[in-house]
Image (cartoon, rainbow, N blue to C red):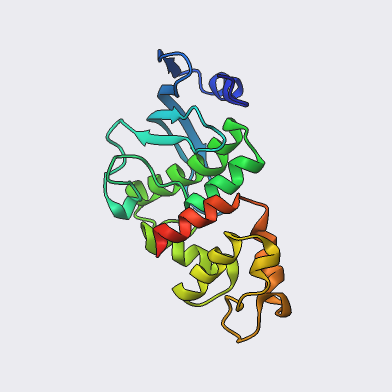
């Protein structure tokens, strides 16, 4: 199982080790990474973070799972830690859209894990709330994120957008516009907003997401 960018990640983080696993299964990493980061006027953070990473067999069609295993990050919602101990590095849409376009694991690590652990470190060590902003935990955060992505105001509009993305373009354009203007999607300028997201992820992904958020 070849993971683009994994060798670069291991070279830059020599305290990380690849754990033995069965052939064809997920790749498991465990060890310490060096955080040395600063954002604008906020304090620089330099420390070792003990992590465990699971890169699934389906990567980049399924996202890596990060856990902080050294006891530094409190396992609570307000630190965006999921009930199973995994770190919430972003909404599923943002993460999956990113890795399908850029499957390099080392790039993903720098794009999602480093900002997360830096923000958490500032909160723990300097009582600074998440410097890059934060969404609510769970489904509420996903809905909040989609309000920003689509430029809509409520859940019904979001579900309408996801429903449009879950069907073929020619069919979606004949249905009422998710912006709830009263026109069909194809006759509303909002179809440009929908089409921007149409090829990012497959229709089945949007269909499953709509079912989960409904």
As drawn, 89 above or below 212? above
Q: Is residue 78 left or right of residue 172?
A: left
Q: Which residue is located at x 40 percent, y 12 percent? A: 20
Q: Is residue 109 left or right of residue 155?
A: right
Give the residue at the far bottom of this rendering. 182
Specify the quadrant that holds the N terminus: top right
Q: Nearer the viewer, residue 31 or 146?
A: 146
Q: Find residue 159 and report its horizontal and vertical position in percent.
A: 49, 68
Within the image, what quadrant is residue 171 found in? bottom right
Specify the quadrant that holds the C terminus: bottom left
Q: Which residue is located at x 48 percent, y 50 percent? A: 92
Q: Is residue 135 visible?
A: no
Q: Is residue 123 visible?
A: yes
State how many labels appear.
0
Q: Which residue is located at x 55 percent, y 75 percent? A: 152
Q: Find residue 15 and report its horizontal and vertical position in percent.
A: 45, 19
Q: Find residue 172 and report its horizontal and vertical position in percent.
A: 64, 68
Q: Find residue 22 and report its horizontal and vertical position in percent.
A: 41, 14
Q: Nearer the viewer, residue 70 or 27?
A: 27
Q: Which residue is located at x 72 percent, y 69 percent? A: 192
Q: Nearer the viewer, residue 5 or 110?
A: 5
As drawn, 190 above or below 7? below
Within the image, what quadrant is residue 29 found in? top left
Within the image, what quadrant is residue 134 found in? bottom left
């Amino acid at each position: 199982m070849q993971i683009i960018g994994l060798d670069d990640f291991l070279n830059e983080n020599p305290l990380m080790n690849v754990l033995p696993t069965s052939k064809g299964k997920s790749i498991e990493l465990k060890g310490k990474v060096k955080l040395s980061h600063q954002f604008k006027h906020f304090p620089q953070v330099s420390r070792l973070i003990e992590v465990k990473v699971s890169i699934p067999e389906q990567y980049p069609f399924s996202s890596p799972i990060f856990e902080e295993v050294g006891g530094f990050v409190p396992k609570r919602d307000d630190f965006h830690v999921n009930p199973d101990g995994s770190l919430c590095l972003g909404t599923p849409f943002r993460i999956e859209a990113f890795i399908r376009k850029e499957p390099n694991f080392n790039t993903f690590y720098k794009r999602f894990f480093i900002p997360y652990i830096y923000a958490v470190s500032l909160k723990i060590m300097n009582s600074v709330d998440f410097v890059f902003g934060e969404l609510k935990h769970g489904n509420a955060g996903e809905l909040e994120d989609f309000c920003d992505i689509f430029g809509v105001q409520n859940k019904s509009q979001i579900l309408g957008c996801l429903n449009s993305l879950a069907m073929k373009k020619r069919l979606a354009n004949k249905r009422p516009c998710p912006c709830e203007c009263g026109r069909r999607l194809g006759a509303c300028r909002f179809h440009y907003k929908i089409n921007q997201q149409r090829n990012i992820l497959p229709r089945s992904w949007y269909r499953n997401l709509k079912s989960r958020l409904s």
